[in-house]
Image (cartoon, rainbow, N blue to C red):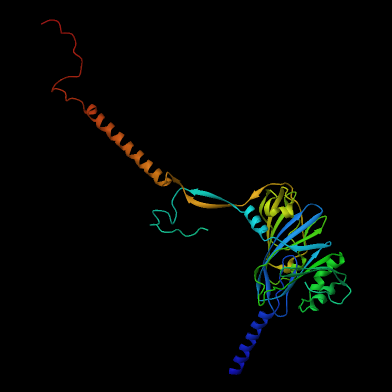
Amino acid sequence: MRNRIAALLLLLLATQLGSLISPAYACGCGAMVPDGTSRIGVSRETSAVRWDGRTEEIVMRFTVAGNARRAAWIMPVPTRASVELGDADLFRKLTWLTRPEHKARHYFFPRSGDWPFSTGGDRAAAEAPAAGGDASVGVVGREQLGDFDVARLTATDPDALRQWLESNGFTMPDTLATEVKPYVDQKWEYVAVRLAPRKQGRVLYGTLDPLRIRFDSERLVYPMRLSRMAKTPQSLGLYVLADHRMEPVSLIGGSAPKVTFAGKVAGTDELAPLTGGRETFLTAIDQEFPEPGRISGDHELRAAPSDTPYRRTVYHDELLVVGGFPAWMLALGAVLVAVGAGAFVWLRRRRAEAPAASGTPAAPGASDAPAGPPAAGA
């Protein structure tokens, strides 16, 4: 019995260790792969996309967790791309522009926490590496951008990208070649990024520096197919800058996209590198992918039927107050005063009418009949 219990405990321990060291493939618009037995997960991807009908620019940043010191990230692009570091302040500006509008929503009668149901106190809160030797993979450019080693690749064989990464010490999922094949058939190219912090001992954790990728495209497309390899639910936030309000053509296997902002914005300050200083229409879209394996393809965005502006509104419930006093107390006081005044008037009338109603007592034997003329005779 002891041996069986010990064997069972060892089996459970081995299972847990296996889950800890198994690679986690997570991504938003590309494939992010850790080195060796490290783990990395992308919990949130936020991208700003600018499209003028001919050229598309994507500034993207990842929020990651895990213990990986190095990782590779691959993004398919329809044409030759240029890559540079993006400006982190861009997302601060976009967050500010798309912030929700806060409004007070008043209620009349007191609720829990309002006097007399509360005696006071605080209220609770309401609210990229060198190429391998395979000739089917070509390196058309390579740049060192901060902690990113970026290689721009071409590939004519779906297995070539996997072999390229494996030759540089990365473990690739068996499904990568299958997922990449549609891009190879369409003769797309690839941006491969090696994330290797230069500071000794540093791991990839938190919000990474953004990258800015630019390529020619006659349609606004946001690559998502490789997200199918993610093992955990994915969250995508898109800030789309275009001439009109934009919307996804289809759900591509995710939940219904939510528009959190739509409206024209000035192309100044941090937005100038994307907008050229011109006014543009900004559409902010959030989408969840609870089951990444159901992602069916890339996001394609089109102009919405109309440029209807939209901003989220956050309502804060507040007790209606007039002149510093709760309105319900003033109303109750007014009712009490009115009732008191009415009672006072009624009592005064009763007292005034009481003597008139009783009158002066009549003499005994008196008749109410009018006196006639004196009788004749006698």
Quadrant for the N terminus, please: bottom right
Residue 161 versus residue 339 in the image, above or below? below
Which residue is at 28% across, 35% downward?
A: 347
Residue 340 visible to the viewer: yes
Which residue is at 27% across, 33% downward?
A: 348
Quadrant for the C terminus, please: top left
Residue lying furthest left in this view?
378
Residue 1 visible to the viewer: no
Where is residue 87? Give x, y as percent. 69, 60
Q: Is residue 3 left or right of residue 49?
A: left
Residue 352 versus residue 243 in the image, above or below? above
Where is residue 137? Give x, y as percent. 86, 72
Compare residues 188 and 7 and report the one nearer the observer.
188
Question: Residue 337 lies in what quarter of the image?
Answer: top left
Residue 289 versus residue 277 in the image, above or below? below
Where is residue 356? Give x, y as percent. 23, 26
Question: Residue 355 lies in what quarter of the image?
Answer: top left
Question: Residue 129 lies in what quarter of the image?
Answer: bottom right
Compare residues 133 and 301 and report the one nearer the observer.
133
